[in-house]
Image (tube, coloured by chain):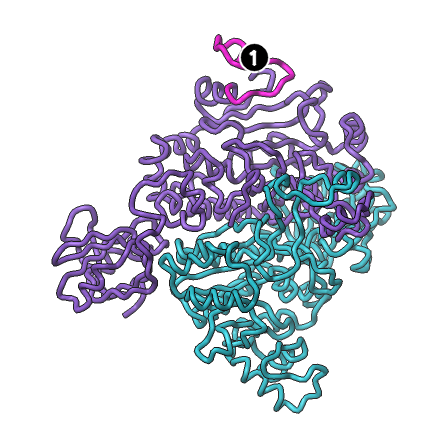
Chain colours: A cyan, B purple
Amino acid sequence: MKKYESKEIHELSGKLLGQEMILEGWIKNHRKQKEFGFIDFFDGTHFKSIQIVYDNKLSDFDKINKFHVGSAIRVEGKLIESQGTGQSYEIQASNIILEGDCPEDYPIQPKRHSREFLREQAYLRPRVNLFQAVFRIRSIAAAAIHNYFQERGYVYFHSPIITGSDAEGAGEMFKVTTLDIENIAKNEIKDIDYKKDFFGKKASLTVSGQLQAEAFALAFKKVYTFGPTFRAENSNTKTHASEFWMIEPEIAFTDLDGVMEVEEEMLKYVINYVLTNAKSELEFLDKFVEEGLIKKLENVVSKKAVKITHKEAIKILKESGKAFENTPEYGQDLATEHEKYLTSEHFNSPVFVTDWPKDIKAFYMRLNDDNETVAAVDLLVPGAGELMGGSQREERADILEKRMDEMGVPKEELYWYINLRKFGGCKHGGFGMGFERLLIYITGVENIRDVIPFPRTPNNCEF
Amino acid sequence: MKKYESKEIHELSGKLLGQEMILEGWIKNHRKQKEFGFIDFFDGTHFKSIQIVYDNKLSDFDKINKFHVGSAIRVEGKLIESQGTGQSYEIQASNIILEGDCPEDYPIQPKRHSREFLREQAYLRPRVNLFQAVFRIRSIAAAAIHNYFQERGYVYFHSPIITGSDAEGAGEMFKVTTLDIENIAKNEIKDIDYKKDFFGKKASLTVSGQLQAEAFALAFKKVYTFGPTFRAENSNTKTHASEFWMIEPEIAFTDLDGVMEVEEEMLKYVINYVLTNAKSELEFLDKFVEEGLIKKLENVVSKKAVKITHKEAIKILKESGKAFENTPEYGQDLATEHEKYLTSEHFNSPVFVTDWPKDIKAFYMRLNDDNETVAAVDLLVPGAGELMGGSQREERADILEKRMDEMGVPKEELYWYINLRKFGGCKHGGFGMGFERLLIYITGVENIRDVIPFPRTPNNCEF
């Protein structure tokens, strides 16, 4: 008898009817009757479970009848048209063998558990429907991102995780050290000698791979990163994690319009890919997590994103007649409520907001001719706010250095970044997308802790 | 005029002959004559450069004639059959515009630079042939790995980078902290209070995602990680880096034979993919880095790997008549020279060495019935030694706990790992492959510092 996976059965069901087969997986639910038993079976290869039917003609009926929810089993049987309702095919078992028992006090029972409870059981939660859906979509969306860039000739670039630079400027950093800090304290050593540390100097966890990606874009034209980044910010919100994955494409010989084109095309590609390859998962999420989820995603894919400048955005907000908690102001950042109004009420489509006031943006963004704004862009989407942030990079060494001085960015440390402008520099740009922010948007799950397998947040580093 | 990339030109050359086009990229070399100029042009999208020819009929001839190597240019011209030898087509330029100058003291000149020198110029080295080849292969091999697993229904699992566990046991760990260690020292605080640290306890950088991947394999059946891992070992060898990427597949309902099947199939898939998609790069490396490289790779793909036990390996070594520096001994690890003899001399093929002495392997490997060996496997390949290490995992909770006690692995911290055996546990296994080790093997480049964009090693954390 050949082994099959539930994915094959669901995808080839018609062709496999009548086939004898072996299945290996777990009991999701178990309904017992006097003469029959029904096992809701899953093996993790497909979102939908499979019904296993067995009857008391099996010599082990009494034993099988006592198998607990959560147990690992091996099923031998035949795929037949279902006699019952709720599924069109099922397995008529000729034998069911217990591979691994599960006690009755197993934390995951066939009922609704709270997300908070499941976070505490993070090593078991991938077994429940919600997280089967979320983490398979996480994998499928990651594949889509790689496919998108690889098909277009981008080079996948692994930016360094440990960095000796603290000038990346995107947020608070974690220190990385091998110094014996406990003994330094005990021995009353007053000055830390970083020469004795592993790297011979202070080191931290990266907050962005962009600066290094620029070096590679000026050699490979089109590159992208996809790796973990870190923020040591003590903020306990639904959208902040201390460790998260980012995608940072960087493209030579392009301007802000070119960057926006890639942002929009990539977003639509990834969403289409998930719509096609995670149908059952999205249907489940649409039903139980965010009503209208699929429609929302289809809407984004079909709409052409609007482009407005930051100035225009503020004007629209001011003229909206809305009583915002935060008054929209020229020269100021947009608040979440502003983003929401623009995307969900005013335009009902993704919105690129371009040309931001230079004082609230990073030193490497290209200064516009007005000397007041920079060629930066945020992509806002209905229902999630800012999804990507990009810019054309300042390619003029003199202006870059001036901006670094103004903003207190140490130039010595970033000599090589400045040199990129002197050694065959060119117009270039790129953007960053937080992978988990995309997943929150695609799955409708609103807490970042629920789209990361083992999330790290302040005071939480379990498993 | 439409923009083209050199990749399109090399792939579609026949169809594009006669086409007017714009190219954007860099000057690799520049030969100047009185009436003509020849620019060796590359834009990073294809390994091979393109010859740009211009003549003194261009009004800017005198200016163009002075463009330096390394400069960024925009070329307008027509793709024509080459008049010269060495290439079958070239661009007859109608205009060449300087996008970004490059001074004459540019560190990267059209000559052979030492690898040591280029490591110091890590932000510029991706522009030279060797690193154009290596880093494009890095990207292509990464894509191959994702394709292999995604096509087979594996779920891509992001294992946590920051871990609160120091029981992973694969090596020395970096500490991650936000404590103000300088002030702790200055203020003579004698006991570090980790409750005040970011995660409320000690935290480190992961050395392996395997234990967490097991939790996901027991929910999704087949998963894989592909992410950075870390070793704080103060070793300055050609094959050790402090930060490197690992691939760790984990599969439920499989045994050691199943693990080996995946190892071999994946290796051949990735090598075939690179052979197909990085032809020019491999030809270059074969010519200038490792003679016979392509033949070596083709040989591995065509050969079925041999399977021997550790005992058999020692027997072969003892009977070889070779004078090894390290005498091969039952119960002991294999030395590099032993691996070399087995793969390159004795078998001339990849070799799986299975069933290792339990005392030299990790606590989670499944104890064999002989009570002396574990179901572990190393895959050795000719010319690189150990490429992957895998095992069937101990699925029996009682034996696992006994092994943890014997080996001093703290059980409290890994309660969840033990629970995986109690809550529907099953036979399962997996393996780990260091991505850079694979790249060293595929590219022939022998130093790990030359296959990582910005390598981190003791006392080196530049860029």
Residue depicted at 57% across the width and 74% down the height: A359
Q: Nearer the viewer, residue B25 or A416?
A: A416
Q: Which element type, helix, strand or loop, lies under badge 1?
A: loop
Residue depicted at 48% across the width and 73% down the height: A375
- Residue B20 point in image, percent of width and height: 23, 66
Q: Relative to B161, is A378 above or below?
A: below
Label 1 neighbour load within 10 Å: few <14, some 14-19, many 20+:
some
Magenta stretch, residue numbers: B316-337
Q: Could you tell me the amino acid type at mark 1? A: Thr
Residue depicted at 66% across the width and 20% down the height: B357
The answer, for residue B2, to whether it is visible in the render is yes
- Queried whether the magenta region covers residue B329, the answer comes back as yes
- Residue A180 point in image, percent of width and height: 72, 39
- Residue B341 point in image, percent of width and height: 48, 18
- Residue B231 point in image, percent of width and height: 62, 38
Say whether residue A373 is left or right of residue B365: left
Q: Which residue is mark 1?
A: B327
Residue depicted at 71% across the width and 49% down the height: B182
Q: Relative to A215, is A23 above or below?
A: above
- Queried whether the magenta region covers residue A235, the answer comes back as no
Q: Nearer the viewer, residue A323 or B349?
A: A323
Disc 1: which chain?
B
Say whether residue B79 is left or right of residue B127: left
Q: Nearer the viewer, residue A407 or A297?
A: A407
Q: Nearer the viewer, residue A412 or A439?
A: A412
